[in-house]
């Protein structure tokens, strides 16, 4: 069997990526559905529209989580440490 034939068989066997509804995605993200619906309405999170239906792929959910990441800040130096003791 040639490489092209193998790729064709793999494509036929491959399942399409499952898309999640808002309630399903909210459960995966552990957030209220209202929070997710509002972010979709404001177009602040990655999502897909199939007509009037909103769906999320795994990569959309990863983008939402990545976009919500908070970077740690270095501790602020106290102002009195900068002043010279006279």
Image (cartoon, grey):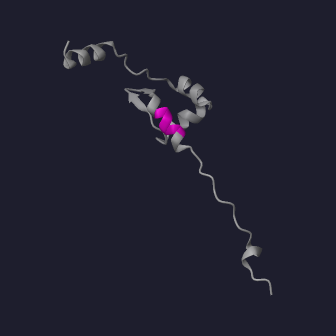
Q: Is residue 82 left or right of residue 37?
A: right
Q: Is residue 73 above or below residue 70?
A: below
Residue 56 visible in image: no
Horizontal side of residue 20 vs 6, given as left or right: right
**What residue range appears in magenta?**
60-65
In depth, the one of 4 and 74 nearer the eye is 4
Image position of 77 (left or right of 59): right
- Name of the residue lying farthest toward the right: 86
Write the residue at 59% across / 51% down: 71
Please, is residue 46 above or below residue 56 in the view? below
x 58%, y 31%: residue = 29
How many discs appear?
A: 0
Name the quarter where the N terminus is drawn.
top left
**In percent of the image, x 25 and y 15: which residue is there?**
6
Give the image location of residue 45, x and y in percent: 48, 39
Residue 23, horizontal then vertical, whole percent: 56, 24
Q: Quadrant of the C terminus?
A: bottom right
Q: Nearer the viewer, residue 14 or 33?
A: 14
Residue 27 placed where, x, y %?
59, 25
Q: Is residue 22 visible?
A: yes
Front one among 1 and 12: 1
The image quadrant of residue 2 is top left
The residue furthest front is: 1
At 53% across and 27% down in the image, what residue appears? 25
Please provide percent x and percent y for residue 13. Answer: 33, 12
Q: Is residue 62 magenta?
A: yes
Magenta segment: does it hold 86? no
Q: Main secondary structure of the magenta part?
A: helix
């Amino acid at each position: 069997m040639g490489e092209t034939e193998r790729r064709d068989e793999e494509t036929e066997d491959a399942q399409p990526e499952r898309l999640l509804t808002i309630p399903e995605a909210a459960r995966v993200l552990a957030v209220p559905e209202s929070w997710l619906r509002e972010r979709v309405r404001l177009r602040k999170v990655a999502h897909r529209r199939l007509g009037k239906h909103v769906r999320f792929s795994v990569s959309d959910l990863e983008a939402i989580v990545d976009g919500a990441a908070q970077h740690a800040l270095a501790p602020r130096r106290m102002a009195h440490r900068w002043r010279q003791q006279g």
